[in-house]
Amino acid sequence: MLFLVAALLLLGVVMGTVAHAPLSFTLVAAVVIAAWLGVFAVRERRRGPSAH
């Protein structure tokens, strides 16, 4: 439960920051995060379930 509260608090802080940031900065940050998550997903798929 504490994790959920902390996650919602962090989400609120991030969303508040994004609301005041310029649109170009927000788009660049979104692309960087999406690329990072994509690389992570590809690495996890290549590693396979038996390597955990």
Image (tube, grey):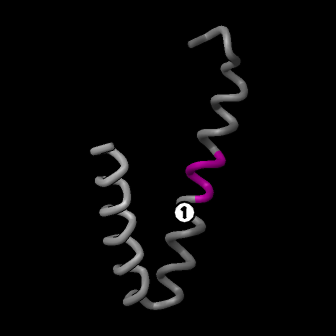
Q: In x, y percent, where is residue 38?
A: 65, 48
User: In this figure, what is the number of numbered marks?
Assistant: 1
Q: In x, y percent, where is residue 7?
A: 36, 54
> Can you say whether 8 is above or below 50 in the image?
below
Q: Quadrant of residue 30?
A: bottom right
Q: Quadrant of residue 14?
A: bottom left
Looking at the rendering, in which quadrant would you find the C terminus? top right
> Can you say whether 38 is above or below 46 in the image?
below
> Can you say whether 29 is above or below 44 in the image?
below
Q: Is residue 36 magenta?
A: yes
Majority SS type along the magenta span: helix
Residue receiving disc 1:
32
Q: Which residue corresponds to the image point at 39% horizontal and 65% vertical from the top-left?
A: 11
Q: Residues within 10 Å of mark 1 (few under 14, many from 20)?
A: few
Kindly identify the amino acid type of the residue bearing the numbered disc 1.
Answer: Val
Looking at the rendering, in which quadrant would you find the N terminus? top left
Q: Which residue corresponds to the image point at 36% horizontal and 71% vertical from the top-left?
A: 12
For label 1, the SS is helix
Q: Which residue corresponds to the image point at 37% horizontal and 49% vertical from the top-left?
A: 4
Q: Is residue 20 magenta?
A: no
Residue 44 is left or right of residue 3, and the answer is right
Q: Which residues are magenta?
A: 34-38
Q: Which residue corresponds to the image point at 31% horizontal and 71% vertical from the top-left?
A: 13
Residue 39 is left or right of residue 23, and the answer is right
Instruction: Return the residue nearer the eye: 2 or 43.
Output: 2
Q: In x, y percent, where is residue 28?
A: 54, 75
